[in-house]
Amino acid sequence: MTDGRRQAQIEELAQWASSADARAAATADLRRYGLAHGHDQVADVLGDVLVKIWGRILEEPLDERDGTSVIAYARRSVANSVTDLARGRHDLSLEDLMDSGYTPNPDEFDLVDDPLIDTGETVSHVRMALHGELSGRYVQSWYVAAALVVVALSQDDLAVAADIPCPSATHGGAVRPEYWAALAYAGQDRCFADPDTSAVRERRSQAMRRVQQTLARALAATAGDSEGVR
């Protein structure tokens, strides 16, 4: 019964996150705080919410006994996410923040666990969905390229090249070598600049989040046929 609830909630969440209602909610909240509210900013907010709630549902289905629906929970999460943005003024670019003397968090961004992809059929569907992302007007191709690398490394017995950067325990946060490799293979050399300052780590963390959001959208697109995703 729990697995059925989990799958139903994931499907409801994914459908809402790609809806006009979700985009309107994120846009309204961004405008309320005077933040940039273009397509990219709205997509960032919704992608962040999708990843976070997806990860929570995977741990345990949301409790809807008090009458709170998945959509209501997602709307609150959008509002909370925008509030966090407003407090941190994350609408500024990293370069602007660095120029103004901003010192990022020294730890890596703590990625939530990716949904597991168990079957070859599901992998094929996810890869097709990722290729479909390339047709999006506002999607940068390196997001997709990196996400495809993550999928490949999670499924295939592949070894990365010796010169590909690899995290160590000193980097803090979640140590995710597959995301490091994905960024490197996607040509994001700026994420591995030397010296490895807090600003470089912040850039790398933001890039990893973009890749995970892209992968989450692909997984959401295949949710209806994803018995292999748990």
Image (cartoon, rainbow, N blue to C red):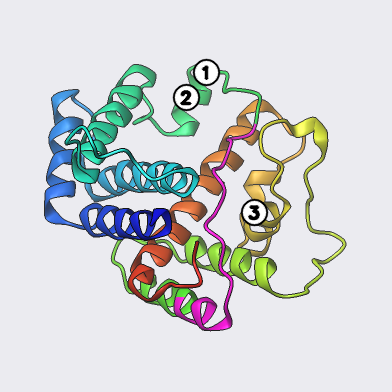
Q: Which residue is mark 3?
A: 179
Left or right: residue 160 versus residue 75 is right
In front of the other: 94 or 221: 221
Left or right: residue 63 versus residue 94 is left
Q: Amino acid at mark 2?
A: Leu
Badge 2 or badge 3: first in the primary sequence:
2
Image spot of residue 205 (x, y percent): 57, 39
Q: Which residue reaches farthest front?
A: 1
Circle 2 residues within 10 Å: few <14, some 14–19, many ≥20: some
CA gap, disc 3 to disc 1?
Answer: 25 Å
Q: Amino acid at mark 3?
A: Tyr
Q: Amino acid at mark 1?
A: Tyr
Image spot of residue 40 (x, y percent): 30, 48
Q: Identify whether 38 is placed above or below 145.
A: above
Give the secondary structure at mark 1. loop
Q: Is residue 59 magenta?
A: no
CA gap, disc 2 to disc 3?
Answer: 24 Å
The residue mark sitting in front, 2 or 3, is: 3
The numbered disc on residue 102 is 1
Residue at 49% across, 32% down: 95
Give yes or no for contact between labels 1 and 2 (Cβ–Cβ under 8 Å). yes
Residue at 78% across, 73% down: 158
Give the secondary structure at mark 3. helix
Which residues are the magenta region?
Answer: 108-125
Image spot of residue 57 (x, y percent): 41, 46
Q: Identify whether 188 is placed above or below 68.
A: below
Q: Which residue is mark 2?
A: 97
Give yes or no for contact between labels 3 and 1 (Cβ–Cβ under 8 Å). no
Circle 3 residues within 10 Å: few <14, some 14–19, many ≥20: many
Badge 1 or badge 2: first in the primary sequence:
2
Give the secondary structure at mark 2. helix
Image spot of residue 183 (x, y percent): 63, 56
